[in-house]
Image: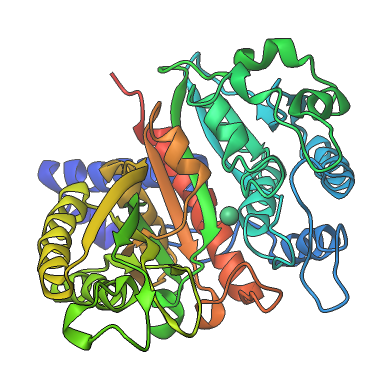
Amino acid sequence: MSALHSRTTGGHVYRVASILAVAVLWIVSFATHPLRAHGPGSTKFHVDAQRLQGTLEKLSEFGRNPEGGVTRLGFSETDLAAREYVSALMKQAGLEVRIDPAGNLIGRRAGSENLPILLFGSHIDSVLHGGNFDGDVGSMGAIEVMRALKDGSVKTRHPLEVVIWANEEGNHFGLGTLGSGVAAGVLGPEILKRKDEQGLTLADWLHRYGQDPSHLTDARISRGSLAGFLELHIEQGPNLDEHSIPIGVVQGIVGLKGWQCVVTGFANHAGTTPMNRRKDALAAASKDVLIVREVVRAESGRQVGTVGYLKVDPGAVNVIPGRAEFPVELRDLDATKIDRMWVRIQERFKETDQEENVETRCTLLEDIDPARADPDFQSAVGDAAKSLGLATMALPSGAIQDAQQIAKIAPMGMIFVPSRDGISHNPKEFTSWQDIANGAEVLYRVVLLLDDQLNRN
Ligand SMILES: [Zn+2]
């Protein structure tokens, strides 16, 4: 000590003081910055993996099928019971719970500043004979994030809300992403009179959810009232699992265009019509089916193209098919690529028409725009994963998501976790508990990163 002091000059004192100041600042930020509560770059989890597993297991009891998995259709008794459970969890997490007029279940946590809401969540409805992870992981993960924030007494600048969107799968009423669609202003009162198999209208069901359907449009979220939307979800495809990557940074949700094509030939006697005089609609359609696949495969990237069925008339063993009908569906994150592939497919269909002496007409039936994830949200997901030492892969969502609707009114980001063998909408759907915990911890960190970054002047 004295030896040091004896050689201390003014410059040394200054240096020691500045080092001390930096150390103090570092300790202060260490204590106040929630992500550093366990040390800078700590890989220690804030979410409780066991508790999250417990809530997912409990949720899986609502609508459980004998073969495993669940049938928990949106707007069903099972859904209603599961929502009661989830609502109780939200209250345990200290959230102020409400249901909006579209049936979306929302839990709110106040922020320290007067800022737009940072929203995150998913859905708990399933398809018929679905799995236990689609929607459920993101829903229970979001609630676990809220519980972890409460446990750590973490304050955020933005108010935070967890949302469980109503009827994402659309197996009831045939209206997918219903709750988020109403919130985004895409769906309106025209949907209220839709009837289900039992003759109950959507309005009847909203009454059961304690809502006045005449106020449906009050569920609309105004542009500017959301700082952003985040959704944790299983990939429902094989990419992460195949490459053993724990976290997917979603670039966006693919757009989709769907056409119905009709090939018109001429139905005639199968025994008497010479081969060179035939107008065989099925032979032509068969070529067209393979053309779709060839054109889609000829481009590099993750685009997909599907012909889902083929209907043939008259459909008899001894009649040359006079008419064939099939759909063409193309999906990609880049809308111009979809259009480019479609131009090429039509050129090739014309060649088929000439070769087979038929006429093919296609009508556009479905047109859904791709939804890009916000670049800053994508970076936050990447940074959060990196802080945990988890490898990431950037990829699009090939499945329709609630986030696709919300992207129309606010910046959006999605976190994917692996689906074993890429299986989804099936009781065999599976994501490991570790992967689920990783996803929830990444969501926790992304929420805090964005809370820190967004709406700074
Ligand atoms: Zn889903």
Query: In this view of the protein, which residue sits in the foreground, 360 or 187?
Result: 360
Query: In this view of the protein, which residue sits in the foreground, 275 or 313?
Result: 275
Which residue does the image show at 29% across and 79% down from the upper left?
Answer: 283
Which residue does the image show at 11% across and 44% down from the upper left?
Answer: 11
Compared with residue 328, is residue 406 higher up or lower down, i.e. above or below? above
Picture coordinates of residue 208 (x, y %)?
87, 28
Q: Would residue 75 appear left or right of 102 to someone viewing this image?
A: right
The answer to whether any part of residue 400 appears in the image is yes
Q: Quadrant of the N terminus?
A: bottom left
Residue 310: image quadrant is bottom left
Query: In this view of the protein, which residue sits in the foreground, 260 or 383?
Result: 260
Picture coordinates of residue 388 (x, y %)?
44, 66
Residue 89: image quadrant is top right
Compared with residue 435, is residue 374 higher up or lower down, i.e. above or below? above
Which residue does the image show at 45% across and 69% down from the upper left?
Answer: 312
Numbered marks: total? 0
Which residue does the image show at 39% across and 62% down from the upper left?
Answer: 325
Picture coordinates of residue 442 (x, y %)?
49, 57
Can you name the residue that lies furthest to the front here? 272
Picture coordinates of residue 8 (x, y %)?
17, 51
